[in-house]
Amino acid sequence: MSEIIDITEKFRREDFEAFLASYGVDVKICMQCATCVSACPLSDICPGMPRIDMLLVQLGLIDEVIKRLDPWICDQCMKCSQVCPRRANPAKVLAALRDFATFKYDKFGIGRLAIKFKRRKIKKVLETVRP
């Protein structure tokens, strides 16, 4: 008989690193220079995005970065990845986090809640851009 996996338990850091490796990114090369923050159009309403997310992933604090909802707020414009001097690809890391969280934690519909949250954030951005 196969073993039942409890999806409510926290993933080990190694599990997430293997998941992230399947996306072809390595967060260890990020040197925390914050160039990505200056390029991100959402950093005004999400301070530190995506640098803080990269740091949390480097530290293995996956649950903390998921709580920030940044993986869903990111609109994948790829500007952060384009300016990264180390080619750490923060946009791809956020996409991987979104997929990981959906796979791991979406049994209560957090994906739907995050989409509603993202729409409100986008509306705020548009209000500031178009006075």
Image (cartoon, grey):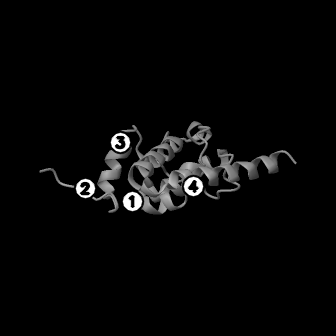
Q: Amino acid at mark 2?
A: Ile
Q: Amino acid at mark 3?
A: Ala
Q: CA distance from mark 3 to mark 4?
A: 28 Å
Q: Residue at x 38, y 53 (%)?
A: 104
Q: Residue at x 63, y 55 (%)?
A: 117
Mark 2 — residue? 5
Q: Is residue 64 left or right of residue 75?
A: left
Mark 2, secondary structure of its residue: loop
Q: CA distance from mark 4 to mark 1?
A: 25 Å
Q: Are marks 4 and 1 in contact (CB under 8 Å)?
A: no
Mark 3, secondary structure of its residue: helix
Q: Residue at x 35, y 45 (%)?
A: 19
Which numbered tag is attached to residue 111?
Answer: none
Q: CA distance from mark 4 to mark 2?
A: 25 Å
Seen from the viewer's position, the closer of residues 102 and 14 is 102
Mark 4 — residue? 113
Mark 3 — residue? 21
Which numbered tag is attached to residue 60?
Answer: 1
